[in-house]
């Protein structure tokens, strides 16, 4: 993609120098009128920094939104966008080929530094690869052994339309930055943008609560749903959180109400590193200790037979810090 760079260094330098001379003239006796004249004569407007939220969540973190809020923003050349992590779920802000739209994206490769660590500078050049690295409100990057960031900023010196994605959630989680010429009037203020983000967050939360109701209705003592998602609203809860069964019975853990989110069922010690992707332990004869489903993509099922009386706590190794934990009580 070719973009026009509006503020080449030389031109900016001359403009700033001219403005400085005019301001000095004003200070020397011409008064405020001369300052106004300098602005009217084409002194560049001060660049603005805009905030876009990355993801959303309810207060209890049960519902995570996989959306940039808002997904579309219009700024002027020279402005900066700061993406602010707004949920515990991990996301990235990633411009491929300088912000070229993509028909599809490969699944996230958590071992590829290009995908999970910060890449590119702080100025969009219209051609390069830019990646925020992992953005989250949490203290770390979840299961990924890479740094986590609370925010990411990029300055847009040239006009154009720049499309970006979250590499964790794929082409469905997309945002666009429209860059107008410097000085063009803005269609929305930051307050307008914040209000739209809040409105979209409320809609996502309502969708999440509706999913939660559907999942509750479908679950039973032997059918535990591993959350649910519609591609945007993600429920990060086992449903029901606690089930009571008898010795020798099975529980089916179902990630069948999701279209996007992977989960795990993990009893005992949480596997570290790449081991998190592989199943371990014997689900056909569980008598306590370590048992791990591996990475369960949408559509997956995992069945465990409980052959010991007791209380068995488990987690989703990906989302336990959002409260995705469960309990199986086995009675004689
Ligand atoms: Cu999970």
Image (cartoon, rainbow, N blue to C red):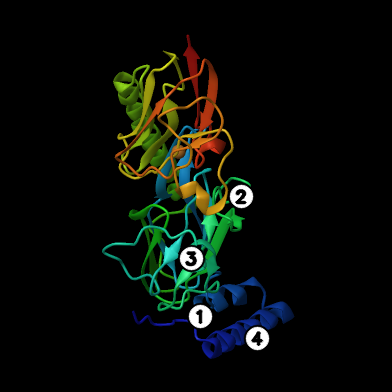
Label drawn at residue 21: 4
- Residue situated in front as seen by the camera: 25 or 108: 108
Q: Which residue is mark 3?
A: 112
3D distance between C-alphas at marks 2 and 3:
17 Å
Q: Earlier in the sequence, mark 4 or mark 2?
A: 4
For label 1, the SS is loop
Q: Is residue 3 left or right of residue 118?
A: left
**Do the CB atoms of the residues marked 4 and 2 lie less than 8 Å apart?**
no
Q: Earlier in the sequence, mark 1 or mark 4?
A: 4
For label 4, the SS is helix
Residue count near mark 4 (Cα–Cα under 10 Å), binned few <14, some 14–19, many ≥20: few
Q: Earlier in the sequence, mark 3 or mark 1?
A: 1
Q: Which residue is mark 1?
A: 41
Depth-wise, is mark 4 or mark 2 nearer the camera?
2
**Do the CB atoms of the residues marked 1 and 4 lie less than 8 Å apart?**
no
Is ligand 1 within 8 Å of the beta carbon of the residue shown at mark 4?
A: no
Label drawn at residue 259: none
Label drawn at residue 140: 2
**Do the CB atoms of the residues marked 2 and 1 lie less than 8 Å apart?**
no
Is ligand 1 within 8 Å of the beta carbon of the residue shown at mark 2?
A: no
């Amino acid at each position: 993609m070719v973009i026009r760079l509006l503020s080449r260094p030389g031109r900016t330098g001359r403009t700033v120098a001219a403005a400085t001379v005019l301001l000095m003239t004003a200070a020397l006796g011409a008064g405020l009128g001369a300052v106004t004249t300098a602005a009217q004569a084409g002194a560049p407007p001060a660049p603005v920094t805009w905030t876009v939220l990355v993801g959303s969540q309810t207060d209890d973190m049960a519902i995570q939104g996989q959306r940039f809020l808002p997904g579309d923003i219009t700024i002027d050349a020279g402005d900066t966008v700061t993406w602010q992590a707004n949920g515990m779920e991990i996301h990235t802000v990633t411009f491929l080929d300088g912000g070229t739209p993509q028909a599809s994206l490969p699944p996230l490769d958590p071992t590829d530094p290009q995908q999970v660590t910060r890449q590119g500078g702080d100025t969009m050049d219209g051609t390069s690869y830019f990646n925020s690295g992992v953005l989250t409100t949490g203290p770390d990057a979840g299961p990924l052994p890479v740094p986590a960031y609370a925010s990411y900023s990029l300055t847009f010196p040239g006009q154009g339309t720049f499309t970006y994605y979250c590499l964790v959630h794929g082409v469905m989680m997309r945002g666009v930055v429209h860059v107008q010429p410097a000085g063009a009037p803005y269609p929305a203020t930051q307050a307008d943008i914040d209000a739209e983000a809040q409105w979209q967050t409320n809609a996502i939360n309502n969708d999440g609560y509706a999913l939660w109701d559907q999942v509750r209705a479908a679950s039973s003592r032997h059918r535990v749903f591993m959350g649910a998602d519609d591609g945007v609203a993600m429920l990060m809860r086992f449903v029901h959180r606690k089930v009571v069964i008898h010795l020798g019975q099975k529980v089916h853990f179902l990630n069948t109400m999701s279209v996007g989110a992977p989960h795990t069922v993990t009893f005992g010690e949480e596997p570290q590193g790449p081991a998190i992707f592989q199943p371990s332990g014997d689900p056909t004869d569980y008598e306590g200790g370590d048992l791990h489903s591996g990475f369960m993509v949408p559509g997956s099922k995992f069945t465990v037979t409980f052959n010991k009386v007791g209380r068995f706590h488990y987690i989703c190794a990906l989302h336990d810090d959002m409260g995705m934990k469960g309990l199986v009580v086995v009675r004689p």
